[in-house]
């Protein structure tokens, strides 16, 4: 299967063209949503609003990690300078990541997806799994054990877990701590510095939980994990309205299209999906498109079906 069988040269040129305007809007939108969440909790502080905020902030941390991902691919902005500067300080550092380290291992994932050499295989090769195993994983995530293990790995330099592959422990950890310090100061000068604890709580709980669901959705229990055709080793999820912006921030659910053409900016993947659908790209692979993350979980955990 070749991309040129489905896309003309002009279409590929259009879809791979970056836009500073669209990249800037994507970054601004993510941080406006984060600001809105903190504002709502500040105005209506109660146990329910705090729990909802922690869950939503985990989804927004996925959102900024997607910005890191895009900057690592050099697709968020038109120039390497903007991808590096904004991708690091407004994408990677707030979640203690590093565009450079992430991109290095992520390129290997793309290069080897559909083979036994895929470095990310440990995150999803065991699926489908039993209900008991799935619940144990969810329990570790939501109680903070996964997040604490990841955080400890970043400080020890060993890294490796749901959020980053082995070897991605950052040379930029101090920059990440500095970015979080600046974030705290912004909240402090807004009179809500104590609410920074919600960002930490989300990082340790809902962020790893949503990251796990995303990884399972992208490559777990697929048609053939060891076939290089992306229609077999990954999938695209069409989210329910309540899943958008939380589990699949920034259209990250169009993962099949991303593997087909990694040079396409994430803000064009939905449009690419529609065009490929019209051209019959998915016709003989109905399993490559799933509607809703609930259906994905039922495929990954057959006992829940």
Image: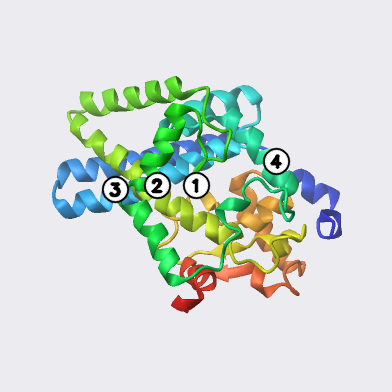
Asked whether disc 2 touches disc 4, contact meaning CB atoms under 8 Å apart, the reply is: no
Residue 131 visible in the snapshot:
yes
**Viewer-side residue, 211 vs 47:** 211
Mark 4 or mark 1: whose residue is earlier in sequence: 4
Q: Residue at x 74, y 48 (%)?
A: 112
Which mark is on residue 162? 1
Say left or right for 100 vs 262: left
Write down the residue under mark 3. 54
Q: Is residue 244 above or below residue 22?
A: below
Say left or right for 150 vs 52: right
Mark 2 or mark 4: whose residue is earlier in sequence: 4
Label 2: which secondary element: helix
Distance from disc 4 to disc 1, alpha carbons, whole Å, reads 16 Å
Mark 3 or mark 2: whose residue is earlier in sequence: 3
Q: Residue at x 76, y 70 (%)?
A: 280
Q: Residue at x 21, y 48 (%)?
A: 50
Distance from disc 2 to disc 4, alpha carbons, whole Å, reads 24 Å
Crowding near the residue tagged with mark 4, few <14, some 14–19, many ≥20 C-alpha atoms within 10 Å: some
Crowding near the residue tagged with mark 1, few <14, some 14–19, many ≥20 C-alpha atoms within 10 Å: many
Mark 1 or mark 2: whose residue is earlier in sequence: 2
Return the x and y of residue 90 as percentages of the image width and height.
46, 30
Write down the residue under mark 2. 146
Exactly how many numbered labels are in the figure? Answer: 4
Return the x and y of residue 20 as percentages of the image width and height.
59, 33
Crowding near the residue tagged with mark 3, few <14, some 14–19, many ≥20 C-alpha atoms within 10 Å: many
Distance from disc 4 to disc 3, alpha carbons, whole Å, reads 32 Å
Write down the residue under mark 4. 108
């Amino acid at each position: 299967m070749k991309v040129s069988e489905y896309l003309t040269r002009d279409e590929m040129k259009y879809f791979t063209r970056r836009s500073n305007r669209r990249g800037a809007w994507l970054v601004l939108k993510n941080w406006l949503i984060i600001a809105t969440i903190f504002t709502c909790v500040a105005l209506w502080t109660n146990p329910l609003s705090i729990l909802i905020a922690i869950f939503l902030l985990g989804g927004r941390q996925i959102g900024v990690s997607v910005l890191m991902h895009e900057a690592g691919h050099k697709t968020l902005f038109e120039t390497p300078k903007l991808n590096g500067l904004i991708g690091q300080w407004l994408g990677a550092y707030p979640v203690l990541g590093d565009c450079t380290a992430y991109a290095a291992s992520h390129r290997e994932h793309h290069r080897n997806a559909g083979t036994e050499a895929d470095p990310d295989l440990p995150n999803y090769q065991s699926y489908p799994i039993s209900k008991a195993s799935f619940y144990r994983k969810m329990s570790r995530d939501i109680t903070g054990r996964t997040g604490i293990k990841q955080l400890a790995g970043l400080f020890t330099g060993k890294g490796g877990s749901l959020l980053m592959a082995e070897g991605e422990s950052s040379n930029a950890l101090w920059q990440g701590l500095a970015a979080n310090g600046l974030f705290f100061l912004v909240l402090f000068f807004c009179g809500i510095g104590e609410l920074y604890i919600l960002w930490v709580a989300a990082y340790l709980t809902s962020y790893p939980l949503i990251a796990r669901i995303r990884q399972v959705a992208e490559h777990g229990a697929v048609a053939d994990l060891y076939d290089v055709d992306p229609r077999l080793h990954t999938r695209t999820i069409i989210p329910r309205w309540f899943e958008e912006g939380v589990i699949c921030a920034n259209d990250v659910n169009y993962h099949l299209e991303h593997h087909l053409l990694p040079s396409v900016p994430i803000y064009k993947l939905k449009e690419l999906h529609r065009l490929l659908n019209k051209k019959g790209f998915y016709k003989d692979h109905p399993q490559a498109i799933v509607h809703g993350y609930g259906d994905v979980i039922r495929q990954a955990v057959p006992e829940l079906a």
